[in-house]
Amino acid sequence: MTASKAFGSGMVIQQRNLVEQVADFLTQAIISQQFAPGERLSEVQLARDLGVSRAPVREAARLLESRGLLVSQPRRGFFVRALDASELNDVFDLRLCLERHALARLVETYDTDKAQALRRQVDLMCEVALQDSESRKIEEDLVFHRMLIAFTGNRRLLKAFDDITHELRLCIALIGKTHADPDSIATSHWLLLDALASGDAERCREAIDYHIGVAQHYVVKGIGEA
Amino acid sequence: MTASKAFGSGMVIQQRNLVEQVADFLTQAIISQQFAPGERLSEVQLARDLGVSRAPVREAARLLESRGLLVSQPRRGFFVRALDASELNDVFDLRLCLERHALARLVETYDTDKAQALRRQVDLMCEVALQDSESRKIEEDLVFHRMLIAFTGNRRLLKAFDDITHELRLCIALIGKTHADPDSIATSHWLLLDALASGDAERCREAIDYHIGVAQHYVVKGIGEA
DNA sequence: CGATTGGCGACTGTCGACAGTTTGGAATCG
DNA sequence: CGATTCCAAACTGTCGACAGTCGCCAATCG
């Protein structure tokens, strides 16, 4: 492939780091339950299986540790994060904390551009709810909520959200399926957008509390059953 | 270079992880401004100076990257995080977000044990304010606020706080001094404890908004002058 | 004289290897 | 037969080395 072709099709030349590739692989493997929760991961075996040396594996593992998908014990190695109901509630409580704040900030600077972008994302979510995979639905839902945070303009807030995003993916994936029929998605998210459009901070808070409360209840219940 | 001086005088390292030791050294060096903001850190040079190989240095740098003290550019290495006023406001806004939430949760479960522990910490802060170093004062202040978060029982919230703690240390250290006479410390923090004891959520929110607002104003102003 | 190209040096990404530690089970003892 | 000790295998922490890449500076060209 020639460079001009790569640029022409809008694709950035990315010799992606081995670290990132390994991190992506591990993330997928963990979320898709190919590794059991609490399972010990051997650096040498992973390196062998992936055909790379241990250095990138170690760095990727450290990355996932900072994202809460792995935990490390000194001299013992890395273990797949096992979430119990308590920690899961903690994660959703933190998510509530961040999104409440984001909405409180966002309602001050809400405009038609942002409203339009968010509405388009809800439309997209409804479309994928009809046909695509579960993981795709989850991903588009996370995109919507990430947009909410990003629109506040606070990068540090966004980073905090991105951090728990990985844990959220894990939580949600653990229960296997979402309650994602287009109707409930649309109503549930338009409620948020209406609250934002109204400019009423109190109403925004109620809307996000309800929205996340439903998701939390659903996931925690799902974990309890699993 | 200061690094070789630090470890060159026969100071043998063994007990703890090299990674943690290097991370501590780098953290201290960054906070104490021995590295200029934006400065590029050479892995080989650091490894030479500290008398270790590049592997622990790389892992420690990755750790500090996840804590926001370093930023990495692919194929170019690590750079000391340079905070401008905007990012600094973002950090304090996130801190406000977390502490507001913590107080809202804490006011529900506040009891005499927690009150006593917090009061003791304020007393300790007043003592240190009289004699100890600036960094010690900052540290004890952070301990107080960390206790607030920890008392909510939400570990994930605490981890998020610990993450920005490192950035906060950097921010505060950048302006070199604090407004830490015992009187203002006592009144400022007792206001928070009174609000908590009153059980009034609204009053708690006002108290923490004021408390953090003062700190933020002070630090942002300090940065502007520096 | 300004812009481009080529080469040099330094650095990061990655690798394989060694040493000390942990683990699980076999061998031993009460 | 159960508990303990000890040993070998496997693993992590750490190290030095090599290759590809990037930035800088000089040499070249218009």
Image: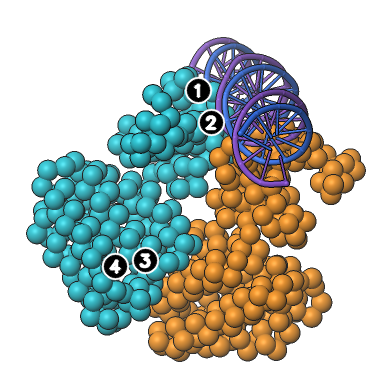
Chain colours: A cyan, B orange, C purple, D blue
**Proximity of marks 4 and 1: CB atoms separated by less than 8 Å:** no
Which of these two is toward me, B83 or A43? B83
Which of these two is toward me, D10 or B210? B210
Please name the residue shown 72% across and 72% down the image: B226
On the image, numbered disc 3 is attached to which residue?
Answer: A151
Please name the residue shown 43% across and 53% down the image: A163
Residue B89 in the image, given as x and y percentages of width and height: 54, 72
Chain for mark 4? A
Labels 4 and 2 in the same subunit: yes
Whole-number angstrom distance, CA of label 3 to CA of label 2: 34 Å
Q: Judging from the image, what secondary structure is the residue with disc 1 in?
A: loop
Residue B62 in the image, given as x and y percentages of width and height: 59, 44
Amino acid type, callout 4: Lys
Which mark's residue is nearer the viewer, 1 or 3? 3
Amino acid type, callout 3: Phe
**Proximity of marks 4 and 3: CB atoms separated by less than 8 Å:** yes
Q: Judging from the image, what secondary structure is the residue with disc 3 in?
A: loop
On the image, numbered disc 4 is attached to which residue?
Answer: A114
Please name the residue shown 45% across and 72% down the image: B97
Q: Please indicate whether residue A220 sits to the left or right of residue A7 in the image.
A: left
